[in-house]
Amino acid sequence: MSTDTEVRIRGLRALVEALGTVEAERFITLILREPFDYTQWQRQLWTEKNVDELSQAAMAMRSASPNKGMEPTR
């Protein structure tokens, strides 16, 4: 299991990789500024996909990630 700091670092890296630095910062600002129910968002996020489809997509993204194996050392 990862520490909170490791999760934050990996999360920020994922945001920057997906959105770029400026848009990642903008996303964080939007999340902090607006009321946000993460649980409700997750329930509505993938309603059109089943668990197998989500799992396959996640595995494909993981193996294609240029940062694979770049997690912080402990």
Image: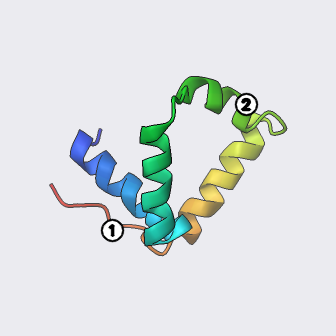
Categorize mark 1 by other alpha carbons within 10 Å: few (<14), some (14-19), many (20+).
few
Q: Secondary structure at mark 1?
A: loop
Residue 74 in picture, x, y percent from top left = 15, 54
Q: Residue furthest front?
A: 33
Label drawn at residue 41: none
Q: Does residue 15 appear in this view?
A: no
Instruction: Work out whether 3 lies above or below 39.
Output: below
Closest to the observer: 38 or 62? 38
Residue under label 1, please give it: 70
Instruction: Work out whether 5 lies above or below 64.
Output: above
Name the amino acid type tagged 1.
Met
* Residue at 54% over, 61% down: 62
**Which corner quadrant holds the N terminus?**
top left
Residue 8 in picture, x, y percent from top left = 31, 49
Q: Secondary structure at mark 2?
A: helix
Instruction: Work out whether 26 lies above or below 8.
Output: below
* Residue at 55% over, 25% down: 37
Name the amino acid type tagged 2.
Gln
Categorize mark 2 by other alpha carbons within 10 Å: few (<14), some (14-19), many (20+).
few
* Residue at 49% over, 71% down: 20
Residue under label 2, please give it: 44
Q: Residue furthest bottom?
A: 66
Q: CA distance from mark 1 to mark 2?
A: 31 Å
Viewer-nearest of labels 1 and 2? 2
In the drawing, does residue 46 fall left or right of residue 31? right
Residue 58 in picture, x, y percent from top left = 62, 52
Closest to the observer: 2 or 31? 31
* Residue at 81% over, 39% down: 49
Closest to the observer: 6 or 58? 6
Instruction: Work out whether 7 lies above or below 48.
Output: below
